[in-house]
Amino acid sequence: METFEFVAAKEDKGERLDRFLQKNLPGVSRSHVKTIIEEGGATVNGKVEKAGASLKENDKVVFNLPSPKNLSLEPENIPLDIVYEDDDIAVINKPQGMVVHPACGSENGTLVNALLYNLSSLSTINGVVRPGIVHRLDKDTSGLFVVAKTPDAKTKLGLQFFNKTTRRRYNALVWGNLADDEGRIEGNIARNPRDRMQMAVFDPSSGIGKHAVTHYKVLKRYGYVTLVECVLETGRTHQIRVHMKHIGHPLFNDERYGGDQILRGTQSSTYNSFIRNCFAICPRQALHARTLGFKHPKTGKEMDFTTDLAADMVALLAKWDKYIEGIKA
């Protein structure tokens, strides 16, 4: 069982309990949330409440999400973009919108379900729910993902991620015009005490959270947004997303971290319409795992892979290119 704690904000006043929880638990369906509430799995200020309970500002909401029961993974015929495969590993170009492994509310349609269908074997060293999985990509982050097909490959790849010897570069579109062409962001990452669905950055001297370092380099400036390359020294949950927000440049259309609002630009209705169209073109945080490098777990050969940006990000950047050209004309 996983427990989530939330504090209702001013804007949540009058919100139904089930709607509030579904909004803050994007990986869990509203029907599943309601079922758990009906079984007594949610409290407001320590009292068990019904799904339709109306929230007040500063209400403390606790939700207990049960672990999957008798979860039986089934292979699913979901097409995958397999960039590379041999007897030990496979490298996948994961699409946005795909959860990596099953959990409550996401029992099927995951990358693992697709892997079971498309690959001849997977390491089960991680157990039935996470076969072959050695690292993470958020549901709405696209890009390169390596999978272990044997126990030995899982162990050796896992050590490389743990020892930070892998090479990972991401492309992200962020709000604002960064002051410097490149920089380094260092700050511990831990759960946000005010919103358990978010991560937050803490001073390294605080002793809170895990050490995290992100390097960034500007690739192209669009005035109100900037395309950057991010290189990870560490691999914390939501690291790029929370680090970029921390320095005042959240990812474009990142709903979890406030990037789904118009944060830079003009007040004109034309610009507002343009941004809304951009949000529709790329309906997720604009983040893509562009390159991935590691040492092959069996041969020891250094391997590096690169993939093109996802189609929605290509279309998004083309939209911004056209907008900038129109301003210059």
Image (cartoon, rainbow, N blue to C red):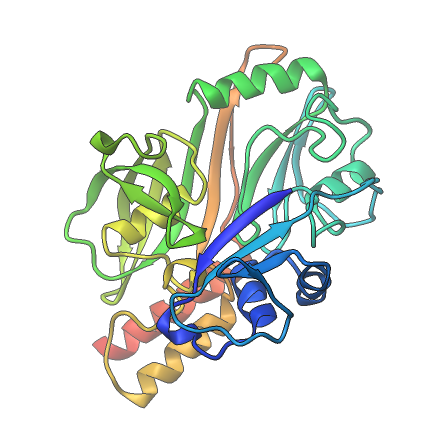
Residue shown at 52%/42% (left/top)?
307
Q: Nearer the viewer, residue 129 or 154?
A: 129
Q: Residue furthest top?
A: 299
Looking at the image, residue 185 lies above or below residue 50:
above
**Quarter of the image with the N terminus in it:** top right
Looking at the image, residue 78 lies above or below residue 316:
above
Q: What x and y, as percent, mark residue 5?
A: 48, 52
Residue shown at 71%/61% (left/top)?
32
Quadrant of residue 256 within the rendered picture: bottom left
Q: Nearer the viewer, residue 257 or 317?
A: 257
Q: Residue furthest bottom?
A: 269
Residue shown at 64%/71% (left/top)?
51
Number of numbered discs:
0
Quadrant of residue 325 within the rendered picture: bottom left
Quadrant of residue 227 within the rendered picture: bottom left
**Quarter of the image with the C terminus in it:** bottom left
